[in-house]
Amino acid sequence: MENFQPNIDEKWELIPDDFSITIKTFPLVFHHDYDKYVTYENGNKIIAPKSLLFSLSKYENLNYPIHLKINQEYLKPDNSDETTVFTIMEFSEDIDTMYIPNKYYQQLEIDRLIASENIVKFNIINQPLEKATTIGIKPFRSCFYQIPNPKQYLEIHLKRSFTVLQKNQIISLIYRDTHLDFDIVDISGEDSEDKDDEKSYSIIDTEITVDLQQPYDYVEPATFPKVNTQHKETTEPEPDPKPEQDENNSSDSRFPGKGNKLGSM
C-alpha cells in the first residue's frame, strides 16, 4: 500500500479564484543532481517535490502543466518581475523543496527569506494559456547570425528552456560556452486581434513562426559618394597656323647660286 497516493480517498475540491501555495524554495544550483538540470538555469522550468503534486491533485479543476508566479510580496522592490511565469516540469520523490533558476532566486527579498526560513509564496495560474503562433525575436548581438542555421537553433533551444513567453521579455539561451540574449519584441497567437502586451503565451506543443529582426548592435554598412570613372571626351588641339611665307622668302631664295646638272660642262 506504500505505492499508493496518500490522499487517494479524499474528496475532490475546486480551486479558489485566488489560489496560492507556500513552499520552501532554493536556487537550482543547490539541487543534489544539478548537472542533470543545468539547462533549466536559462529558462522558466522548475522542479518540485512529489508531495506537492499529491496535495494539488485533490483539486478537480487543476490544469496541467502547472504554471505559477512568485508572489509580489517576496520580491525585491527594485527587481519586481511580475512577468516571469514558471512551469513545474518535474515532481521528484527525492526532494522536499522547490528549486528555481538562480537568477530568479536572486530577485527574492533576503530578509523575508531569512524570516520565513526560505518559504516562498507562489500564485498558481490555473487558466489555460493561449498557444503562440508567431514570435518576433531581436538578438542583442550580431554574432548570433554566425550560427549556421539560426532559426533551427531558436526552435530547439526555445522549447528546451521555456514553456511560456511574453512580449518585451528578455531571454538568454546557451550557445557553446557562452549565452546569447534576445528580446521578444512581438508575440501573438490564433487570436491576432488581442494586443495585450502583458499576456503570456504557451509554446508547448505548438507550431511557431519565428520572425528574426536585425540585432541591436547592427551597424549599417558605410557608404561613400560615387566617383565618376568615365573619362571626358577630349578634343584634339587645333594645329598652329602656318606662318605666312614672305614673297622674298621662297625656296629659291633659301638656296642662292647657280645649279648645274651632273655630267654637264
Image (cartoon, rainbow, N blue to C red):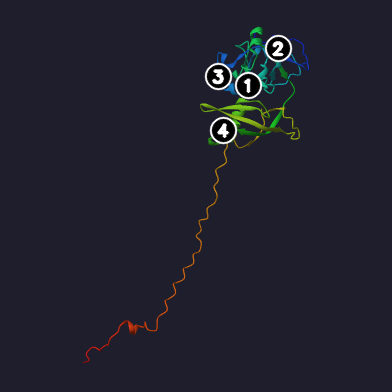
Residue on which disc 3 sits = 36
Q: Give whichever of 194, 155 is nearer the camera.
A: 194
Numbered mark located on residue 55 in the image: 2
Residue mark closest to the camera, 3 vs 1: 1
Confirm or deny contact between disc 4 and disc 2 (CB under 8 A). no
Give whichever of discs 2 and 3 has the lower sequence position: 3
Numbered mark located on residue 141 in the image: 4
Q: Left or right? Give the position of 12 relative to 164.
A: right
Q: Is residue 110 above or below residue 184?
A: above
Residue on which disc 1 sits = 45
Q: How many marks?
A: 4
Residue mark closest to the camera, 4 vs 3: 4
* SS for dot 3: helix
Give percent across and percent down for residue 78. 66, 19
Give whichever of discs 4 and 3 has the lower sequence position: 3
The residues tagged by marks 4 and 2 sit, at their Cα atoms, a distance apart of 45 Å
Give whichever of discs 1 and 4 has the lower sequence position: 1
| Residue 69 in view | yes
Q: Residues within 10 Å of mark 4 (few under 14, many from 20)?
A: some
